[in-house]
């Protein structure tokens, strides 16, 4: 009986201190509701796209629900980068899928700092271009025509990002 009682007390202590709700949510974070967004491009699911929701409501604008689409084109939204779901509200939807051109000499990355080829590797690294595979309007909070309203139903929303295309993203001013 003593071992059982000791086990129960220790178990209750551990459960109490560890908790079962995951990390504590930040103060002021609104209630979150399950939400996913399916992204299609020319009728095909788009994998590897970053989806961000932007609200004009000052109560929720700082929480920034976002996600990355999987092979089926679906992004499960997280708020503040780690809390499942999104606050209720109306949002503009920003979608981007960026990739950098391959490095011409990736094998030089593991060379020591002083090696001349490593210095050349770094110079070439800075010159690599980045491309967005979505029409530019969908990657801009000002120009995106995409909007949606997160409701308490926990459904999968769907957005279409137009034609396939590639545009260079200017990362550094010339």
Image: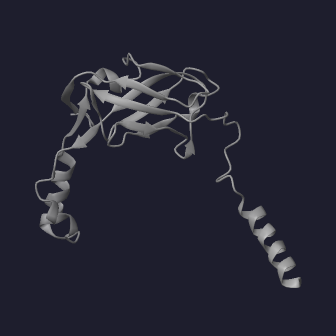
Q: Residue at coordinates 78% horizontally, 62% vertically from top-left?
A: 16
Residue at horizontal 75 percent and vertical 64 percent from the top: 15
Counting from the top left corner in percent of width and height, residue 133 is at 23, 32
Colour scheme of the picture: one colour
Viewer-closest of 15 and 104: 15
76 with respect to 140 (left or right): right
Between 128 and 59, the one nearer to me in the picture? 59
Q: Position of residue 40 (x, y in %)?
A: 31, 28
Identify the image quadrant of the N terminus. Answer: bottom right
What is the quadrant of residue 70 in the picture? Answer: top left
Answer with left or right where residue 102 lies relative to residue 171.
left
Q: Quadrant of residue 144?
A: top left
In the depicted structure, whether residue 107 falls above or below residue 104: below
Q: Residue at x 89, y 84 (%)?
A: 2
Answer left or right for 115 relative to 36: left
The x, y position of residue 142, in whole percent, is 40, 18
The quadrant the C terminus occupies is top left
- Count of labels in the image: 0
Query: Which of 7/166 is in front?
Result: 7
Whether 97 is drawn above or below 100: the answer is above
| Residue at the outermost front position | 1
> Percent position (x, y) of residue 110?
21, 69
């Amino acid at each position: 009986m003593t071992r059982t009682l000791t086990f129960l007390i220790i178990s209750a202590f551990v459960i109490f201190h560890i908790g079962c709700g995951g990390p504590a949510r930040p103060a002021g974070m609104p209630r979150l509701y399950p939400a996913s967004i399916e992204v299609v491009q020319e009728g095909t699911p788009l994998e590897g796209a970053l989806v961000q929701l932007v609200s004009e409501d000052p109560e929720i604008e700082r929480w920034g629900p976002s996600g990355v689409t999987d092979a089926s084109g679906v992004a499960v939204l997280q708020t503040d980068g780690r809390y499942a779901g999104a606050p209720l509200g109306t949002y503009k939807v920003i979608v981007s899928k960026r990739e950098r051109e391959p490095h011409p000499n990736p094998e030089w990355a593991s060379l020591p700092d002083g090696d001349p080829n490593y210095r050349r590797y770094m110079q070439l690294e800075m010159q690599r271009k980045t491309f967005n595979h979505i029409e530019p309007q969908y990657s801009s909070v000002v120009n995106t025509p995409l909007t949606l309203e997160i409701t308490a139903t926990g459904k999968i929303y769907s957005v279409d990002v137009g034609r396939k295309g590639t545009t260079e993203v200017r990362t550094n001013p010339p």
